[in-house]
Amino acid sequence: MLELIDVRKTFNPGTINAKKALQGVNLHLAPGDFVTIIGGNGAGKSTTLNAVAGVWPIDSGTIKIDGKDIAGLPEHKRAKYVGRVFQDPMMGTAATMEIQENLAIAARRGNHRTLKWGISSKEKIKFRELLSILDLGLEDRMTAKVGLLSGGQRQALTLLMATIQQPKLLLLDEHTAALDPKTAAKVLEISDKLIAENNLTAMMVTHNMRDAIAHGNRLIMMHDGKVIFDVSGEEKKKLTVDALVEKFSQTSGEEFSNDRALLSK
Amino acid sequence: MFINYLQSLPAAIAQGMIWGILAIGVYITFRMLDIADLTVDGSICTGAAVCAVMLLSGQPMWLALIAATAAGMLTGLVTGIFHTFMGIPAILAGILTQLILWTVNLKIMGSANRALPATKLNLLVARIDLYRSIFILILFVFFIVALLYAFFGTEFGASIRATGANLNMSRAQGINTNFTKIFGLVLSNGLVALSGALLAQYQGNSDINMGKGAIVIGLAAVIIGEALFGWMSRNNFAIKLFTVVLGGIVYYIVYSTVIYLGLDADYLKMLSALLVALFLAIPYWKKKYFSSAVNAEKRALKAEAKANKKAEKKDKKEVA
C-alpha cells in the first residue's frame, strides 16, 4: 500500500545548520495497517509524515502509494491520496469559514473544483450525520465559524475532514499533543472509530508510549532518521512501556531522550 | 457657502462609488487572500489608459470597458506569477509590476495624459451629468457584488477563500494555492482597472499619475466600511462588499468636507495614509494590550513563578 524506499532528506545542506533528518527510511505498509510511530526528539517521526505528504521534496528515495510513485507530486496533488491531521489544532481548519464550508472543501479533495455551488443541501444532511458521530454537538452548529470552536472540537473536525473523502492513507502527526488529557482521549477514540469504520491505512506519530502501544496493529520506533524497531500483531500487544524504553537503549545505544514521552509514561 | 458644500456632495458620492469598486478589488486581495497588493497603483491607470485610447479611437463603450478590465486582469496575472512561480514576496511583486506598468501605461497612452472631453464623446459617467452617473454607478456596484457573491459561493470560489483563511489546510485539502492566489490577484486587478476606466471618464482624462496612492484610498475605504458599517454585515458576504463601497463614499464625503473647511488639498494624501495606519494598528493594539486571553496567560505565568519560588523555599528548608 505505502512503500518508502531509502528516503533521505537533509535540511539546510551545506550550511552550519545542516540537519540530516531522514537517513534512509524504509517502510512498507500493508492495506489496513494502523502504525504508531514513536522516537526521541529529532528522530524523524514528523519528518517522515511530511515527506509522504509532500510538504517539501525529498533528496532521494522512493515513495509509492499503491505502486504509484508520488515522490515527484506537489503537496496539493498528493492530497488526493493522503488525509492529514496536524499537531496544531489551528492548522487543519479554516477559522473564518463555517463548519459546513470546511467540510464541503474537504469533501472535494482530489476532485476538480468547479463553478457549481460550493455546498449542496444533500451534502448538508450528510454532514449533519457525520458530525453527530463525533458526539460534540457540532451538528447543531453547522453555520458557526470554526474559529469559535475549542482545540479539541477543531481537531475532531479536522479528523472528519481528513477522512470524509476516504483517503488511501491517513497521517496523524501528534494530533492530540496540544490537547488536555481528557480531550486527547476523546479525539483518539474518534480517530480509532473513523479508521476502523472506513478501513483506513494510517500512521500516527505520538509521544505517548502507552497510546502507541494501545492503538493500531503495528508500532515502529525511529532514531536518527531511521526505523530501528518494527513490531506488529501479537508481539506488539504484549509490549510494555518499560520494554520499549529498554528496547530503545539496546538498539540505539543511547538513553531515550524525549522529555514529553518520559513524562507521559 | 454651505449650499456650495451640499452641491459638492453628489460628486463625492459618485467619486466614492468609483473608488468603491477599486476598494472591492482591494478587499479581495487584502482581506480574503491576506496579500497587500501594490499592483493597484499601476493597474488603475492601465484601466484608464486602455479605456481612454479605445474611446478616442472610436471603439464602442462596452468594448472599451471589457478591454480595460481584461488589461487589469493581465497586470494581476503578472504580479501573481512573480509572487508564486518566481517566489517574490507579494509586496515586492506588486511594486515590480507597478514599475513595469509605468512604462506600459505611457506606451498605451502615447503621452502622460489623454483628455476625454465629455462634450465630444458619449461617456457613461461624467461630471456634467452627475445624477445619471450615480444611477449608472449604482447599477455597476449591484452587478459586481451579485457576481462576486455568486462566484465566491462556488466550489472554486470557496477554495480561494480557504487559501486566504489557511494555507496549510488548503494544500492538505488538495487546493493548488498558487493557482488560487493568482486567480485572486487577476480578479482583483480586473476590478481595479474597471474602476480606473470609469474614473478616467468621470474626471475627463487619463493621467499617468492618477494611481499614486490608490492602494491607500482602497484600504481606507475597506477599513472605514468595516469600522462604520461592520455591524450591518453580520456574516453576509454581499453586505460586506456593499459596506466597502459605502466606505469609499464616506471617504470622499469627508474629503470634500475638509476641503470645504479650508484645508490645503496637499495634506490629504498624508492624512489618508495616517488614517489607514491608525486603523490598521487598532486590531493589533487590541490583541496586544486588551486581549483577555493574553492577560489570562500573563496571570497564569505570574502565578506559576510564585508557586515555583514557594517550592524552592520549601526545598531549601527541607535540605537545611
Image: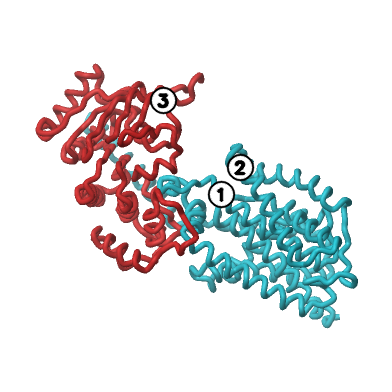
Q: Chain of mark 3?
A: A
| The quadrant where residue A208 appears | top left
- Secondary structure of the residue carrying numbered label 1: helix
Which residue shows up at 58% across the image and 41% down it? Answer: B84
What residue type is disc 1 on?
Lys
What residue type is disc 3 on?
Lys
In the image, the chain rendered in red is A
The answer to whether any part of residue A151 appears in the image is no
The front one of B290 and B260 is B260
Alpha-carbon distance for marks 3 and 1? 29 Å
Asked if the residue under mark 1 is in contact with the one under mark 2, i.e. CB atoms within 8 Å, the reply is yes
Q: Are marks 2 and 3 on the same chain?
A: no
In the image, taking residue B74 as reference, residue B292 lies left or right, namely left
Report the residue marked by disc 1. B181
Report the residue marked by disc 2. B83
Q: Position of residue B285 (x, y in %)?
A: 55, 55
Report the residue marked by disc 3. A9
- Secondary structure of the residue carrying numbered label 2: helix
Q: Residue furthest top?
A: A253
Sequence-wise first label, 2 or 1: 2
In the image, the chain rendered in cyan is B
